[in-house]
Image (spheres, rainbow, N blue to C red):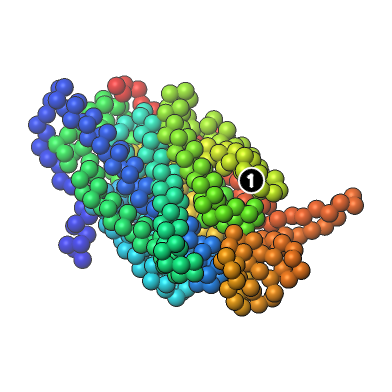
Amino acid sequence: MKTFLSFFAPAAPRPAVLQGAALDRRYNFLRIRQVLAMLVTYALFYVCRLSFSVTKKTMIDSGAYTAKELGFVGSALLIAYAIGKILNGFLADHANVRRFIGFGLFASAMANFAVGFHLYAGVLAAVWFGNGLVQATGAPCCVVALSRWFSKRERGTYYGIWSCSNNLGEALCYIITAVVMVWAREYFGENSPYVWKSAFWCASAMGLAGIGLVAMFFRDSPQSEGLPPVNVWKNEAADAKEKASAGDVGKGQRIALTDWAVWMIALSGGLFAASRYAIIDWGPFFLQVKKGYGEIDAAWIVSINSVVGAVSSGLSGIVSDRMFKGSRNELALIAGVLNVTGLCLLMLVPGQHMWVDVLALSFFGLASGILLTFLGGLMAVDLVPRVAAGAALGIAGMGNYIGAGIQSIVSGFLIKDLPETVKELGDGAKLLKDGSTLFKDGRLVDAAGNTVNRFYSTSFEICGSEVTVDWIAIFWIGVAMLSLLCALSVWKRRPETADGAR
C-alpha cells in the first residue's frame, strides 16, 4: 500500500540550470505543450464517459435495458463522479498529477471495455459507478496542473482553452461512436447486440491511446522540469489569501471549505449541469422520439452544441480576462439567459423544424461552453489560494455532478417504459405487446394509428383551449432558470489579483 501511494507522490524537483532567455523559451514551450496535452487527454475522458449516451436508444429499443435501468446507471456514474470530484480534488493538490490522470484514464477505458459484454443491470451500475470515481481524476489533475504552470492573471485564458476539451470530447464521442454503430449495424445486422457494444469498445480503444499522450507530453510541475515556480517566474505578488495559506495546502483547503461563495457556485453549477446533462444524456433520444429525426441527424444536431461550446469555452476565459479584468460574473449572466432561451426553443416549439433546433442547440452550446468553464470550477478556483485549486474544483464539481445525477434519475422517470416486444416487423419496426408499433426512428404508434408521446405529459383546458404540459420540458427549463438565479447571488464577489505580475 505504501508503495502504491508513493507512486502518486509529487514528482521530485530537478536542479535549475537555465536562466534568462533560455529559461523563458523552455518555460513557454512546456506550457504550450502542457495545455495541448490536457486538452486532448481530457477530451478522451469525455469519450469514455459519454459512450453511454450515444447507445441509450439502441440499448432500450433492443430490449437490453429499460429506460429506468439506464437512468439509474447514468445516475450511478454522476453520483460517483460527484463523490470522486471532491475526493480526487483534495488528493490532486498533494499528487503527481501526471501519474494520477494516467491511472484514471486507464481505469475508465477498462470500464468501457467491460460494459461491451452486456452485463446485468446491477453489475452495469456498479461498473459505471467505478467509472465515475476514476473519471473524477481528470478535471482536478488538469486544474491543479494549470495552477502550477500559469499565473492568476492568465489563468482564465488557459482554463478557457482547456475547457474546450469537454466539447471536443462530446463531439468526438457523438460522431465517431455513431459512425461505428452504423457500420456495425450494416456489418452484423440491424438487431445485433454488437451495434451498441461496438461503441463501448471504440471508446475503450480511444482511452487507451490517450495514456500514451499523457506519458509523452503531460508534466507534473515546473519544478519537476528544473524550472522555478510560476509565481516566481512571473514576479507575481501574493494576494491576501495566498499570504493567509503561506503555501500550506491544508490551510488553503480550509479557506476553500469555509467560503460560502464557493458553495453557492457549486449549487448554481449543479443546477446548470442538470440542464446540460439532460441534453448530453437524452438529447439524441429526445430529437428522435419527440421530433422524428433519424439516428445520424439527431447525433449531429446535438453535436452542434459541442462544437459551438468548444469555441465559447475557449473564448470565455480570454474575454473575461481581457474585457472584464478577470471577473466572470457578466459573461455568466449572458450565458445563463442564452441557456434558458435555447432550451425553450428546443422544447416548446412543436414539430420538426431543423433550423429552429439547430439554432436552439447553438444557443445552448454557446451558453454551455461559458457556464461549464465558469460554474464548473474557474469561478471557485479564482476565490481560493493557488495551493487549494483542486479542493475548490472538487467542491464545485461535487455540486455539478450531484445535480447531473439527480437529473438522470428524474429524466428516466419522465420517459415511459415500452411494453414487451411481440415480434420484429420489416425495416427495423417492432410490434409491442399492447398492439402498438415502435418504428426504427423511435416513433411509437398505438393500435389505432395515433402517435404516442413517449414523455409523460398532462393536458388541461384554459379558456376552452386544450393545453398540454410536457413535464420533462418543465424540469429541464426550470433547473436552468434556477441556476441563473443562484449565479447572480455571488455577483459582488470578484477574484483577488496581485499587482506586479509581468
The residue at the point 47 percent across, 35 percent down is 312
Residue at point 53%, 32% (across, down): 331
Is there any visible trace of residue 274 in the rendered image? no
Direction right: furthest residue: 464
User: In this view of the protein, which residue sits in the foreground, 340 or 402?
Assistant: 340
Q: Nearer the viewer, residue 77 or 147?
A: 77
Tag 1's secondary structure?
helix
Q: Position of residue 67 (x, y in %)?
A: 56, 67
Residue lying furthest front:
426
Q: Can residue 323 be seen in this snapshot?
A: yes
Q: Amino acid at mark 1?
A: Leu
Q: Where is the C terminus found, in terms of image quarters?
A: top left
Q: Residue at x 36, y 62 (%)?
A: 201
Quarter of the image with the N terminus in it: bottom left
Compared across the picture, whether 277 is left or right of 170 comes to: right
Task: Give how far across and how far down residue 144 sits, in percent.
Answer: 32, 43
Q: Residue at x 64, y 61 (%)?
A: 443
Mark 1 lies on residue: 346
Q: Could you tell me residue 449's position as x and y percent? A: 74, 65
